[in-house]
Image (cartoon, rainbow, N blue to C red):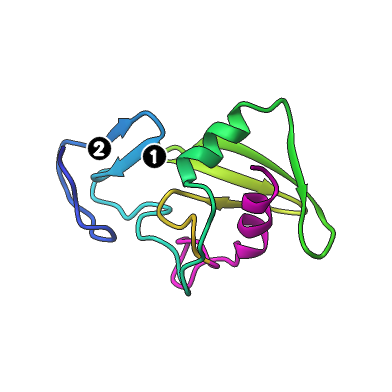
Amino acid sequence: MLTGMHGQGIVGILDIIVEPLNVCVISVKGEYMAHPNGGHGQHHGMRHSFNAAVAHIRGQALTQFHTEAGALITATTRINRNGIVLIEFKHNYPYTVCSKCWEYPRNCEGKDGVRIGHYTVPFDASWL
């Protein structure tokens, strides 16, 4: 399989290589992509892998859980326009997580990431 260094745009004719539930970003017309680099902050010890979480959500009619603060969150999966599989946590605003930032308190959006640990950790603990 071809791989690229995360965070570096590679100009070429290959855009994406997609395997079932695993996504390897090669390039999209040389542009940086949403969720390319991995998360930010100290690594959480998650009970489930990203792929297991995606499979769990896809296997449920409706996946909801409560955060430690008591907010009801709905978890869904989707594939973004670049072909990256995401888990989306919806409360007031949708927050997304990819396989590279699954175990971190902040996702890999933007320079410093968006805080997502308060969704991923209770979701991970909410099912066996």
Residue 78, position in %: x, y? 54, 35
Sequence order check, earlier mark of 2 and 1: 2
Write the residue at 37% across / 52% down: 33
- Check whether the beta carbons of the residues at disc 2 and disc 1 lie within 8 A of each other: yes
Q: Which span is picked out in magenta?
A: 105-128
Residue underneath mark 1: 82
Left or right for 61, reference 97: right
Relative to 46, residue 21 above or below = above
Q: Nearer the viewer, residue 10 or 88?
A: 88
* View extreme (front): residue: 128
Q: Amino acid at mark 2?
A: Asp
Left or right for 26, reference 106: left
Residue 21, position in %: x, y? 41, 33
Inter-mark Cα distance, 2 to 1:
8 Å
Residue 64, position in %: x, y? 76, 41
Residue underneath mark 2: 15
Write the residue at 47% across / 74% down: 42
Q: Is residue 124 magenta?
A: yes
